[in-house]
Image (cartoon, rainbow, N blue to C red):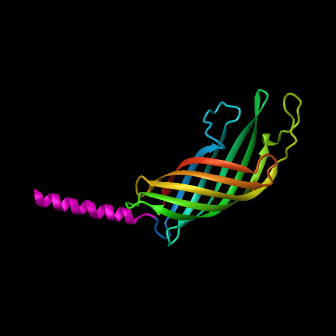
Amino acid sequence: MKKRFVIFSLVVLCLSIKAQAQRYLSGQTGLQFTLGTVNGLNLDTKSQNFSFHFGAKYSTYTKNSNRWVIGCDFLEKRHPYKDISIPQTQITGEAGYFLKFLSNGSKTTFFSLGASAVAGYETINWGEKLLSDGARIENRDNFIYGGAITLETEFFLSDRIVLLINIRERLLGGSSVGKLNTQLGIGLKFILN
C-alpha cells in the first residue's frame, strides 16, 4: 500500500511539473475575449451614463515570456441629455506588446504591462445629428488614433483556460468628445496550442 502511494505521488508530481512547463512557451498562441466598464464601475445598464466595452484579441508568446497582441474593441459611452442618452461609439483595432514582469512560483498567476497602438472610428449617436426635441449634435464622426497602456493579470485555471483581469488607459486623438478613457475588464483566454 505504501509503495502504491509513493508511485501515485510521483506520477502526480510529474504531471504537475509538466503542466507548469506548458505556460508562456515561445510560439504558444491564445484567443481572448474581454468585457468591462469605461470610466468607472457603473454596472447599471439602464443608467443614462452607462458605458461598456468588449473585445477579442489574438496573442502569441515570445521566447522571453512576453507576448504580441492584435485585436479589436467595441466601446460605447452614453452621455445623458434630458431624458435620453446619446451614445458615443468607438470601434478600434490595436496591436501591442506585453512584458511579463511578475509571476508566482507555481506559474499560475502572471502580471504583464503592455503598450498598444490603437486606431479606428468614432461615431456620435450613430450619425443621427438631429434629436427628437429639435436639438442638433455638433460633434462629428471621426477617425481616431493613439495608444493604450494596459496592466493585466492572468490566472491560469488550467493549461488551456486563463482568467484575465485588466485595467487600461486609452489616449485617442481625433475624438470630438473625449481623449482619455479608463477601461476595467475581465475576460477569458483560450490557449490554442
Q: Residue at x 18, y 62 (%)?
A: 7
> In this rendering, would 119 be left or right of 24?
right
Does 122 appear above or below 30?
Answer: above
Q: Residue furthest left?
A: 1
Residue 82 spot, x, y in % from top left? 79, 28
Quarter assignment of residue 120: bottom right
Location of the N terminus by quadrant is: bottom left
Q: Which residue occupies the foreground of this view, 90 or 42?
A: 42
Q: Residue at x 37, y 60 (%)?
A: 106
Residue 177 spot, x, y in % from top left? 79, 45
Q: Residue at x 27, y 62 (%)?
A: 13
* 8 drawn magenta: yes
Residue 68 spot, x, y in % from top left? 58, 65
> In this rendering, would 144 be left or right of 7?
right
* 69 drawn magenta: no
Residues rendered magenta in the picture: 1-23
> In this rendering, would 43 be left or right of 26?
right
Quarter assignment of residue 77: top right
Q: Residue furthest bottom?
A: 63
Figure label count? 0
Q: Main secondary structure of the magenta part?
A: helix
Q: Residue at x 57, y 56 (%)?
A: 151
Quarter assignment of residue 170: bottom right
Residue 163 spot, x, y in % from top left? 48, 51
Q: Which residue occupies the foreground of this view, 88 or 38?
A: 38
